[in-house]
């Protein structure tokens, strides 16, 4: 007996099978778990020798801060870094994926990666998912053609800019950039301006907070300044410390060595290609 | 069966005639207003645009007006509701003048009156669709307050409405300080208005700055800000990747 309809495996893109189930559950009062978002301030600017990227370090799950010190500046290539705003899982996954694609491409071509390569890989991936992969990125790097800075939106559109901000704190950071940016900034001026913009986001936007991360990329050299500024120190720390009421007594000591299950043969044959 | 359902299902719904009697959405709107306290009084800035949805319909709308002897009112939001508020305030000031007792309503009193008007309209589900900035000086006391369309009101050293909340407030928080001189105050307001001009789609490059001190109100002639578009990334965005965008 042959079936009238052949089961075809899904070709790719999102599978919307569970949407009806989710709708039924939400009608019965089951709340969807909130996404871990990086409600964020991320910025980038081009200075005279390269690009500087900056980000805050707060990750939120709805109204709760779930990670006080997360890393939003992701590695793409030795000369390219990418800041991510939006759903944390999406930004991590998409930057990791393109980072490995770039590494394979480097092996294949034997050359340093170009920023436009990362840009095209990211934008085609995001476009094919029609905005469902909620990652808004600020991509910056220095390659053989010079310094580049781009923004990438969740639907796949991109911009090439001298300075860029994304995330919920983007307006506060953009206010700082629009009033203070000019071409030909030195490294110190650039880092100060980026820190100021991120601080503006941290203090004026509820979705951003904690510390400032900065990454400076120049020709042939990069510097990842993790927690470059900590403008939110813990002010009221208990001076007493903690003390346990009773001293801890040791009642019994027993040591069981784990038996080795693998035999290591020194100087064995190397694996064949 | 269907007819019976429709007549019984919504006994509380307003009929279409009643709907047109209350404000549902704004039509002609003004964008942000920014106000700061400075050494001698209050400085306020607003552009002169009146947008009709996404069209920039009116380009000479004065959104700041003096009220009585001691106050200055700036409004963003529905322009017709702003004109209605001016009408109410006209009446208020007139009755106050008719007492002819040497007292006049100061900015604090006008702010309080506006708060009550806005809140009561909101409670009747018929709001005046405005965010107001009220500044003034009386007997040497400077006053700067704001009222929103739902009646949220407070007083502060610097206020902003609309998009100014997101773009101007961070700059004002960082750079405002006590006893700004007139030039510094104007420079600060122009800095904020320039950012708004770049980043708010309903902003026009034609603004007025208003000053109120113990002596009285001065509203400047309309003028425009200088803008800069010469970044090298704007000249050739696809350098190094011909054919991309």
Image (cartoon, coloured by chain):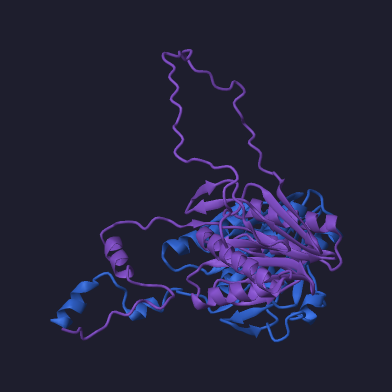
Residue at 62% x, 68% y: name it: A104
Q: Colour of chain A?
A: purple
Of A211 and B196, the residue lying toward us: A211
Give coordinates of residue A262: x percent, y percent.
47, 41
Name the side, left or right, on which B21 lies relative to B35.
left
Give coordinates of residue A255: x percent, y percent.
45, 22
Image quadrant holding the C terminus of chain A, namely: bottom right
Image quadrant holding the N terminus of chain A, namely: bottom left
Give coordinates of residue B36: x percent, y percent.
73, 57
Of A89 and A262, the residue lying toward us: A262
Name the side, left or right, on which B107 lies relative to B27.
right
Residue at 28% x, 61% y: name it: A25
Of B58 and A180, the residue lying toward us: A180
Count of numbered marks: 0
Above or below, comparing residue A108 to residue A57 in the picture: below
Image-quadrant location for residue B51: bottom right
Above or below, comparing residue A82 to residue A155 in the picture: above
Of A120 and B38, the residue lying toward us: A120
Residue at 46% x, 35% y: name it: A260
Q: Colour of chain B?
A: blue
Give coordinates of residue B62: x percent, y percent.
69, 75
Q: Is residue B101 visible?
A: no
Image-quadrant location for residue B37: bottom right
């Amino acid at each position: 007996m042959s079936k009238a309809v052949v089961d075809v495996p899904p070709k790719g893109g999102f599978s919307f099978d569970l949407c009806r189930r989710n709708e039924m559950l939400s009608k019965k009062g089951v709340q969807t778990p909130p996404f871990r978002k990086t409600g964020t301030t991320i910025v980038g600017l081009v200075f005279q020798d390269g690009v500087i990227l900056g980000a805050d370090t707060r990750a939120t799950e709805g109204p709760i801060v779930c990670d006080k010190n997360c890393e939003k500046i992701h590695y793409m290539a030795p000369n390219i870094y990418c800041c991510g705003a939006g759903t944390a899982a999406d930004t991590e996954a998409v930057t990791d994926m393109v980072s490995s694609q770039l590494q394979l491409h480097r092996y294949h071509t034997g050359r340093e990666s170009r920023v436009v390569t990362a840009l095209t890989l990211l934008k085609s991936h995001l476009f094919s998912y029609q905005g469902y992969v909620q990652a808004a990125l600020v991509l910056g790097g220095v390659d053989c053609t010079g310094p580049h800075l781009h923004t990438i939106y969740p639907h796949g559109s991109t911009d090439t800019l001298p300075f860029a901000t994304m995330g919920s704190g983007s307006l506060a950071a953009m206010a700082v950039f629009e009033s203070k940016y000019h071409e030909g900034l030195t490294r110190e001026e650039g880092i100060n301006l980026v820190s100021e913009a991120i601080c503006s986001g941290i203090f004026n936007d509820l979705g951003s907070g904690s510390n400032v991360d900065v990454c400076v990329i120049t020709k042939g050299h990069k510097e990842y300044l993790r927690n470059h500024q900590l403008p939110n120190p813990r002010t009221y720390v208990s001076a007493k410390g903690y003390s346990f009421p009773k001293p801890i007594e040791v009642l019994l000591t027993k040591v069981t060595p784990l038996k080795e299950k693998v035999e290591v043969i020194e100087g064995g044959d190397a694996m064949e290609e | 069966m269907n007819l019976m359902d429709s007549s019984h299902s919504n006994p509380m719904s307003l009929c279409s005639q009643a709907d047109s009697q209350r404000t549902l959405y704004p039509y002609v709107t003004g964008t942000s207003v920014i106000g700061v306290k400075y050494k001698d009084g209050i400085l306020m800035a607003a552009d002169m645009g009146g947008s009709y949805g996404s069209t920039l319909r009116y380009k000479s709308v004065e959104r700041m007006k003096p009220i009585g002897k001691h106050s200055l009112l700036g409004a963003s939001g529905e322009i017709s509701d702003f004109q209605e508020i001016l009408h109410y305030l006209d009446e208020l000031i007139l009755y106050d003048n008719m007492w002819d007792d040497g007292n006049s309503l100061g900015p604090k009193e006008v702010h309080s009156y506006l708060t009550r008007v806005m809140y009561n309209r909101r409670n009747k589900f018929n709001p005046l669709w405005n965010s107001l900035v009220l500044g003034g000086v009386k007997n040497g006391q400077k006053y700067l307050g704001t009222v929103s369309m739902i009646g949220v009101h407070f007083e502060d050293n610097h206020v902003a409405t609309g998009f100014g909340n997101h773009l101007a407030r961070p700059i004002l928080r960082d750079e405002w300080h006590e006893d700004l001189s007139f030039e510094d105050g104007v420079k600060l307001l122009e800095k904020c208005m320039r950012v708004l001009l770049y980043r708010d789609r309903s902003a026009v490059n034609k603004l007025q700055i208003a000053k109120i001190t113990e002596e009285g109100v001065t509203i400047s002639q309309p003028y425009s800000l200088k803008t800069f578009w010469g970044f090298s990334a704007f000249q050739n965005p696809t350098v190094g990747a011909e054919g991309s965008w």
